[in-house]
Structures are given as C-alpha cells and as structure tokens.
Image (cartoon, grey):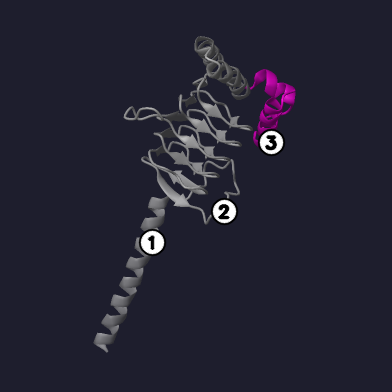
Amino acid sequence: MSSYRKDLINAIMERDPAARSAIEVRLLYPGYKALMAHRRANWCFNHNLKFLARWISERAKRKTGIEIHPAAKIGRGVLIDHGMGVVIGETAEVGDGCTIYQGVTLGGTGKDTGKRHPTIGKNVLIGSGAKVLGPFKVGDNARIAAGAVVLNPVPENATAVGVPARVVRIAGQKPTCELDQIHYTDPVSQELCRLQAEIDELQKEIESRNKEDKS
C-alpha cells in the first residue's frame, strides 16, 4: 500500500467516527475514491496528458459527486467527509490534514487571472456549505464555519463566520474541537455584547450621579 493511500485511510479512520474499517473506507467512501482518482488525474495533468486527466476527474465526479480539477494541489491526510457537492478549482491548494465537508467550494470570483483559487493551509476545517472564493491564503489550523462565504485571507488559528465571513482569532492556539461545526464564536454577537456592557456601565454611572445631585 502506498504511503499516500495509507495516510488517507488513517485520516478517515481517525477523524470520521462512522468509519469502521479500512476495507469499508476503500470500497465505499466517496471522499477516498475522489482523492485517489485525483492523484491519478494530477499525475496525468503534470505529464501533459491533459485529456486523460480530465476524463479521470469527470468520471470521478459522476461517481462521487465531488469535483476536483486535475491541476489542483491536494496534500496528504485530507478528509473529504460525505463530500457531495464539493468543488475544488484548478489553482486551489489544500494543505495536509485538512477536513472538508459537503457542499464546500474552493473557487474563484471571476475577476482574477492566473492564480484564481484559494490556498488552504494545514489542518484547516471547512464546514458544510462554506464558500472560499479568491486567490488568498487561509492559514494553518483555521476553521471556516458552515455556510460562511470567505472573500478575504484568514489568519492562522482563526475562525471565519458569516456572510461575508468575519474573522475571529483564537489566542494563537490550535482549536481543540477540530470537528465541531457548531460552537463558533460569532464576532457580531461579541461586539453587541461588548456594546451592551458599555451601555450598562454608563447607565449605572448616570444613576449614581443623579442620586448624588438629589442628595
């Protein structure tokens, strides 16, 4: 078994609680099949067999529902979980250890030429339905919330939430709950809470001064 195949199976077994055996992963998991097909397609593309590369990728798309351009660069130990509707564009790059859920698009905006798609760092989690659009970098250990639309760079160890996505730093530490797509810190809620706290403090100060004036 090749080291790439082994890393891929291990990633799925470690991060997908539904995976029961390596043979089940090899025979039944669409994310595994799509990435193995992409490895062949990418080799063909890099050896100027572009028609064959595209044929392999289109065949894999029909079988798995996952579309990866043959020229895209995919690292080791990547998990595409469920995977239906995932689209990864021609100049996209995905780092080692990333987790990508269904409905994710790593695409372009239609305004750029050359490098048109995002570069995803290592150990990044991209939640279901998220869209990352444009030729920018998403830093290592970042998290993209489900349904987010990311149009600007995301720093390392940060979370991007919302439409358009806003970024929250996480104290320079790798998130501890790697597969949690629910408990994200919403920067809008944080700001509203901060403003409410300031209003409460001002209200208390006004009431205190009113009491002093009356006395």
Residue 127 percent coordinates (x, y): 50, 36
Which of the 4 image quarters holds residue 47?
Answer: top right
Any mark on residue 194, and which?
1
Residue 99 percent coordinates (x, y): 57, 35
Q: Is residue 166 left or right of residue 49?
A: left
> How crowded is the residue under tag 1: few (<14 C-alpha within 10 Å), some, or many (20+)?
few
Q: Which is the main secondary structure of the residues drawn in magenta?
A: helix
Q: Of the residues under marks 1 and 3, which one precedes in the sequence?
A: 3
Q: Residue 16 magenta-drawn? A: yes
- Direction bottom: furthest residue: 215
Indicate the secondary structure of the residue bearing disc 3. helix
Read off the magenta span. 1-29
Q: CA distance from mark 2 to mark 1?
A: 23 Å
Q: Is residue 188 left or right of residue 176?
A: left
Residue 106 percent coordinates (x, y): 45, 30
Q: Residue 10 magenta-drawn? A: yes
Q: Nearer the viewer, mark 3 or mark 2?
A: 2
Any mark on residue 109, and which?
none
Q: CA distance from mark 3 to mark 2?
A: 21 Å
**What amino acid type should be assigned to the residue bearing mark 1?**
Arg
For the residue pair 114 and 117, the one nearer the viewer reads as 114
**What amino acid type should be assigned to the residue bearing mark 3?**
Glu
For the residue pair 163 and 169, the one nearer the viewer reads as 169
For the residue pair 125 and 156, the one nearer the viewer reads as 156
- Identify which residue is drawn at 74% across, 22% down: 23
State the residue position of label 2: 173
User: Which quarter of the rendered picture does the N terminus lie within?
Assistant: top right
User: Which quarter of the rendered picture does the C terminus lie within?
Assistant: bottom left
State the residue position of label 3: 14
Q: Of the residues under marks 2 and 1, which one precedes in the sequence?
A: 2
